[in-house]
Image (cartoon, grey):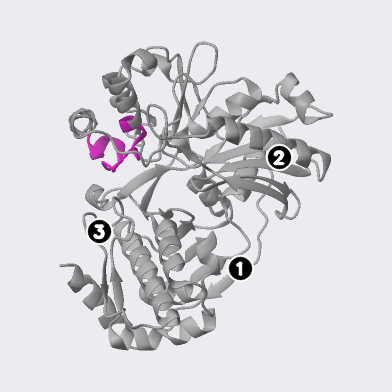
């Protein structure tokens, strides 16, 4: 059967920080229209939770506007992970969709730690807050039994939005396989936690990310002004959306560094045998159901914090400052954003940076991010070229430092967030290669010794 032919695809892309609707040209891969809004957490209620109805109103309004111009033939979905939607028998939310940055009482955390499967089964490390979806479900069931008793269906987050558009409930592999504790990537099935939580009967059927689950519901299509039936595809976890074009276009081994709020690192062509659960190394599951060694840290959030302190800088001047920063031993130690990453439990510390210029402080921040990325790539045994996409692909200082530290080529994709383009591929279109910036490894005097001092300073 031939793949369907679409001219333009609308992607609902809900990240932790922002939500957007993008229309992509199927022939060029270009984003030809984008509407966005902040993703806001509501602090009141039983626990901090996402403003789902505000996101839904935004999505409908954006789709309605974009249906008029430039128009679209299909819809795909991508969202951040570590979220699940709990529906009642009428298909409405039985409980709010919890913000994964909410921390639970110690007794609930301890009970969950005793309940969850081993890393050897799930390849999910025990993460802070609600970063394991299993921990969210355990908390909701334990702390709010009456409300949880009304739950009839559990959906992974991207598929919740697909269900609202189509009326078809589903779960999906990339969302189940992103450190949820709910999935066994070796068997390709649910983990033992599903039965320990007593929720097997609540889990929606598992569908492929590439499945068109149905057309937009008639009443919604009328509201959007859609003249034809528009199919909605099942959807995909955002980091795996970023990975998908490379799985199609590149030959392993290679690494992908997907940057946003999180920096997610994929070692394509690697194995699961040497992952250290205590250092935020794990297995993700790609769109084809295959386990991929992965690691992560909250680098986008950290750079946002640091940039707000530093203010605007000239990128060329910051690159010129690298030598002085290395010579003076100015450094940042992890973690700016606590609770995850390759160096858990470490408290952030600055060394000899108090009198630094703005450009030097920017160079120090980029050195920190490059060192953290390099450490994460080492944890997963990543080999081959390093593909960087998302906001960090525009940071020339970071790219130069990462190439030097890893001693191999870095390929930056500056024109793409990766997530929207990857989600569009679910519709059967082919990936289109965009502009690439190739950064070869160049020797930076003193950098190897600087890295040794950085590690020693953490001890």
Question: Which of the numbered marks, if any, corresponds to residue 85?
Answer: none
Q: In the visual, does 297 lie left or right of 71?
A: left
Q: Is residue 448 above or below residue 197?
A: below
Against 375, is 228 above or below? above
Helix, strand or loop at disc 2?
helix
Predominant secondary structure in magenta?
Answer: loop
Q: How busy is the neighbourhood of tag 3: few (under 14 within 10 Å), some, or many (20 plus)?
A: many
Assess whether residue 228 is covered by the magenta stretch. no
Task: Residue 208: tell me if it is visible.
Answer: no
Residue 392 place in picture, x, y as percent: 50, 64
Q: Give the answer, above or below, for where 161 lies relative to 9.
A: above
Quadrant for residue 451, please give it: bottom left
Q: Which residue is mark 1?
A: 436
- Residue at image location 51% in from the left, 41% down from the top: 40
Residue 418 pos. (x, y %) = 57, 53
Q: Residue at x 47, y 43 (%)?
A: 286
In the image, residue 353 lies at what x, y percent?
31, 79
Which residue was labeled with disc 2?
A: 62
Sooner in the amino-acid sequence: mark 1 or mark 2: 2
Which comes sooner in the sequence, label 2 or label 3? 2
What stretch of residues is rendered in magenta? 118-135
Q: Residue at x 30, y 36 (%)?
A: 122
Q: Is 215 in front, or is 39? A: 39
Can you identify the residue that label 3 sits on? Answer: 343
Residue at 43% over, 15% down: 151
């Amino acid at each position: 059967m031939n793949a369907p032919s679409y001219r333009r695809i609308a992607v609902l892309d809900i990240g932790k920080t922002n939500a957007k609707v993008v229309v992509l040209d199927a022939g060029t891969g270009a984003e030809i229209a984008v509407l966005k809004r902040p993703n806001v957490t509501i602090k009141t209620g039983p626990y901090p939770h996402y403003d789902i109805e505000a996101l839904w109103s935004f999505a409908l309004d954006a789709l309605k506007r974009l249906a008029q111009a430039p128009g679209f033939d299909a819809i795909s979905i991508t969202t951040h992970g570590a979220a699940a939607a709990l529906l009642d028998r009428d298909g409405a939310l039985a409980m709010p969709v919890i913000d994964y940055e909410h921390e639970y009482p110690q007794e609930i955390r301890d009970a969950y730690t005793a309940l969850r499967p081993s890393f050897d089964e799930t390849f999910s490390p025990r993460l802070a807050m609600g970063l394991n979806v299993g921990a969210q479900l355990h908390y909701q069931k334990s702390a709010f039994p009456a409300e949880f008793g009304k739950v009839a269906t559990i959906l992974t987050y991207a598929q919740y939005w697909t269900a609202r558009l189509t009326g078809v409930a589903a779960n999906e592999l990339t969302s189940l396989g992103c450190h949820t504790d709910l999935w066994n990537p070796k068997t390709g099935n649910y983990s033992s936690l599903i039965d320990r939580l007593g929720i097997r009967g609540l889990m929606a059927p598992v569908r492929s990310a590439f499945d068109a689950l149905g057309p937009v519901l008639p009443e919604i299509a009328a509201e959007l002004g859609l003249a034809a039936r528009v199919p909605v595809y099942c959807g995909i976890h955002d980091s795996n959306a970023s990975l998908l074009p490379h799985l199609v276009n590149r030959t392993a081994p290679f690494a992908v560094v997907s940057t946003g709020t999180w920096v997610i690192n994929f070692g394509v062509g690697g194995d699961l045998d040497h992952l250290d659960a205590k250092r935020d190394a794990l297995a993700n599951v790609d769109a084809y159901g295959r386990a991929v060694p992965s690691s992560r840290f909250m680098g986008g959030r950290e750079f946002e914090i640091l940039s707000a302190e530093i203010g605007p800088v000239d990128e060329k001047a910051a690159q010129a400052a690298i030598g002085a920063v290395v010579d003076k031993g100015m450094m940042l130690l992890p973690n700016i954003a606590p609770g995850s990453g390759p160096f858990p439990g470490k408290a952030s510390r600055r060394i000899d940076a108090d009198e630094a210029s703005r450009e030097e402080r920017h160079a120090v921040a980029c050195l920190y991010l490059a060192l953290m990325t390099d450490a994460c790539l080492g944890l997963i045994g990543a080999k081959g070229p390093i593909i960087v996409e998302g906001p960090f692909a525009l940071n020339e200082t970071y790219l130069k430092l990462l190439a030097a530290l890893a001693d191999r080529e870095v390929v930056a994709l500056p024109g793409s967030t990766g997530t929207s383009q990857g989600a569009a591929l679910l519709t059967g279109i082919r990936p289109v290669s965009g502009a690439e910036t190739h950064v070869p490894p160049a020797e930076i005097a003193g950098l190897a010794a600087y890295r040794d001092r950085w590690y020693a300073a953490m001890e």
